[in-house]
Amino acid sequence: MIRLLVLLPLAAAVAAMLLRAPGQRHALLVATAALHAALSVLAFIRPPACAADAWLGLDPAGLLFLGLTSFLFLAVAVYAVHSLRQTRGSQGRQVEVDTGTVFVNAPEAVFIACLLVFLSTMTLVTVSRHLGVLWVAVEATTLATAPLIYFHRQPSSLEATWKYLLVCSVGIALALLGNFLVVIAAAAADGTGGTLLVPELLARSVGLQPAWLKAAFVFLLVGYGTKMGLVPMHTWLPDAHSEAPSPVSALLSGALLNCAFLGIWRAHAICAAAGLAEFSGALLTGFGLLSMGLAAALIVNQSDFKRMLAYSSVEHMGLLAFGTGVGGVAMYGALLHALNHSLVKAALFLVAGNLVALYQTKSIAKVSGVGRLLPVSGALWLAGLMAISGMPPFGTFAGEFTMLRAAFAQGQGGWALAALVALGVAFVGMSRAFLNMVYGDAPAGLAPAREARRAYGPSLMLLALSLALGLWLPNGLHRLLAQASLWAGGGVP
Amino acid sequence: MNAAAILHPLAALLLAPLLPGVINRVKARMAGREGPPLLQLYYDLWKLLRKGAVYSRTTTWVFRAGPRLNFVCLLVALLILPLGRVPAAVSFAGDLVLLAYLLGLARFATVAAALDTGSSFEGMGASREVQFALFTEPALLIGMAALAHASGDLSLTGIYADWPAALMPAMALLGSGFFILFLAENCRIPVDDPATHLELTMIHEVMVLDHGNVDYAFILWGSALKLWVVGALLVGLFPAAATGCPLLDLAVGFLWLVVLAILTGLVESVMARVRLLRVPQLLVGAGVLSTLGLLLTFW
Amino acid sequence: MNAIETLLIALVLTNLVLLGASRLHNAIRIVALQGIGLGVLPILAHHGGMLWAAVLLGAGSALIKGLLFPAMLRRALRETHGHREMEPFIGFNLSLLCGVGALALSFWLGARLPLPWPPVADLLVPAGLFTVWTGLFMIVARRKAITQVLGFIVLENGIFTLGIVLVEAMPLLVELGVLLDIFVAVFVMGIIVFNINREFDHINTDQLAALREDAP
């Protein structure tokens, strides 16, 4: 079943390249997404058994992120179909209003095929139990998303794609070095017995050599941290997430960053099992706070709203790293927050897509009066603002609150205060921009547009889900989160 | 100091002019021509030594002393240099530094004579020559340091007394570095083109442009000796027939020098001169090779 | 083992030449040579068991890095008119001197790293570290996008060399997966460079600076 989860989107990608009619391709995309989501739900209800030394299997965190990725992809697929249909007119030529350049889009077949390959590689990241397979999968996600970022063939997206490809590949190459160091840490004195299987590493954790394991963790953190967007390796993130088309941005922020986080999560679990939790925790907390601080500072004067959302992703990834670093109950909070942040950020990017489609610009100054022209999107934009700022009753509040309370309880109150300050600064910056966008007069020449249900439906559903999770956490989900937290050496509230 | 000790300098004096002949012959043959006779330089030296002299009024005694000082420095260098495992006439700890300084003094003599003419062409050549020396001298010293460390001896005779087979990779690197230095010190392609007739492209040739007759004879003989001296540094890394009989050993050493000359001729025939801006890079590359050899001898 | 040591010294030499190379086609050729040389390394370095795995990995690596990468990169360069030189931020002489410094540092580090078991050759760790450094240096200190791709390949070569230390511990399948990933990465990078050249009419990455933070 796990192999089916990985291979199904791949087969669909091949089929998408062969199909001729756009309608068929769209149907294929949505159908594959739905089937994949159904399979993940099945995996949740009845977890597949796997052999002790199998390379593919589902640990609790993997199962959580698999379900999340699958579900997000379904929502984004529905939106993407709508957005592709919208841009199909005007002979494929579009004008970028900010710079006045004319650009074309890449072939749609390539876009859909790359989306499906992206889903497949993300699935592979979540189901891998072998650090080598994890590495291959993370690099594969980089390669699958590069053409997606370059969908709108503009100079700025090309620049963003180049930065993304190079920075992430170099970072992930360093993670490969980290893999090698893990093998050395696990090997006996004669060179045999080195392993990269996560369950085996957890079982033999006392026998791992601490110095080599520490070095390995540093490289893995820097490597996968590049992909996750931790400062100072985040330089590709604002460009890539803002230049990509909105459905792709939603997936990048909502699903891909989590996959990178999963790699770090598993590495941290190994360190915790080997007794090095303080070391890895301290590193994670440091990177996390640095990310939150810089992102908050750069949100305040942002002029491009998609870039602002991207920096918000950097900040929340920093928060996740911080929570994981603090340890204990905060790890449960980190997972909960990862879940909610993905839902909300994806919803926000999809709404941003609607705004770009109408206003033809990504500049905050030029967008105003969304409440009049696109009422539903405007309401969702405001709701998303509240959600991303961690206001109750949205689920983000629960996650952040758990993390910060655990930090205070464990004597890391000073750092928690710093995190709160960063969150506050970001809130001020974002709300000023968002409120200016929603209220005010509409620019001349634009009339209120009727919003298709497929345009606002997915984001509405995602935000509603986050709201529901904030009000009531299902027991099954709580158990899964608890399992995942305990697996990595954390606690349960 | 026994009689065998002066065999090497004597042989060098007599046989050195053969080396440029070999190089020119190889170049001509590679170009499809017949080429000058092997003994051409001897005929030239004989002709030049019997000529009269005309000196410019702007020159001083420095102009006349330069070529002679150059020649004498190289002769003295021959006294401390071993060839084919035959010990040198004079050897003491640290004489490799003396060798470097002798080469430097020879270069200084040539440069001073060139600057003494007051002509801009010579001045230009002098400045280029000294700039290249800035890169070749450290490379040479680092290479000598590597050899000294590998053999554990600080005297040239001791360094070249045995063939360091155990350090083959390091020796190969040092050999390559020394070959580039050989080409640079003797103003061969790819550093300088000895056959060019355009003053703006000359480096060494332009410094000696105004010398004639006996001075020019000393210059030509001096450059042949320099081929021998720098070549002996490189040839010492090759296997030698350590028969114990000095004549035989020197003969084998001389044969290796001829092989080196043939190799130089081949290199000159297949390559073009490197752009002037890139020559320092080539020399830094030689220095890097020497440094790598040094690092490997420490490893 | 003498053959391995010679190969590793040749690897270090190719890195030094890369630091000083100024023409793009030469640089591509040298990186291809490095790839072929490293393809031979697993065959020489393995001891005991599964010779066919080492041969497969080595042959695949040599083929991909020695033939396919240069072909792809040359194709990406095909429409670059003029500007076939490297145009560095840090000049060639300075790069070479930095390289020598980094080489000395790699030797020093290699002697200090307490590997739990002796590696196949003494020179392995310094050569690997130096290659990693060269790759990173090429990415940072050179202006053209193609040299950044070459730097990435050299970086992977260095990590591959360091990985030979663990030649038994990494399963063949994962090594092949890594190789495949790198192949596709370079393939995609080549396409993007081609597009950059077509779009901007140059491949100077320092001029790709449109997306930047405005000063607050």
Image (spheres, coloured by chain):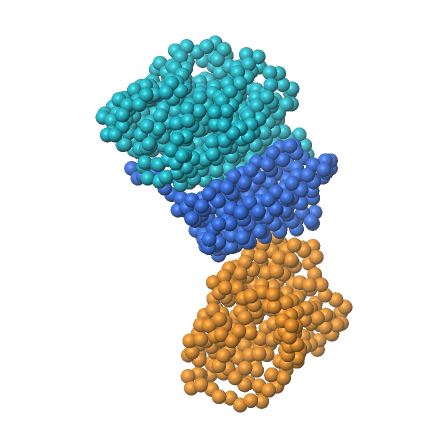
Query: Is there any visible trace of residue A46 in the rendered image?
Result: yes
Identify the residue at horizontal 50%, vertical 26% (top origin).
A25
**Quadrant including the C terminus of chain A:** top left
Q: Is residue A385 left or right of residue C74?
A: left
Identify the residue at horizontal 62%, vertical 54% (top origin).
B297
Identify the residue at horizontal 47%, vertical 46% (top origin).
C145
Q: Which chain is cyan?
A: A
**Residue A269 at x, y = what percent?**
53, 24
Depth check: C75 or B252 in front?
Answer: C75
**Residue C43 at x, y = what percent?**
69, 42
Depth check: A138 or B51 in front?
Answer: A138
**Residue A403 at x, y = what percent?**
41, 19
Depth check: C216 or B93 in front?
Answer: C216
Identify the residue at horizontal 35%, vertical 25% (top origin).
A354
Q: Is residue B49 above or below residue B206?
A: below
Q: Which chain is orange?
A: B
**Residue C160 at x, y = what percent?**
60, 40
Rendering quarter of residue B26:
bottom right
Rendering quarter of residue C112:
top right
**Quadrant including the N terminus of chain A:** top right
What colour has chain C?
blue
Q: Is residue A447 above or below residue B185?
A: above
Query: Is there any visible trace of residue B261 in the rendered image?
Result: no
Rendering quarter of residue C176:
top right
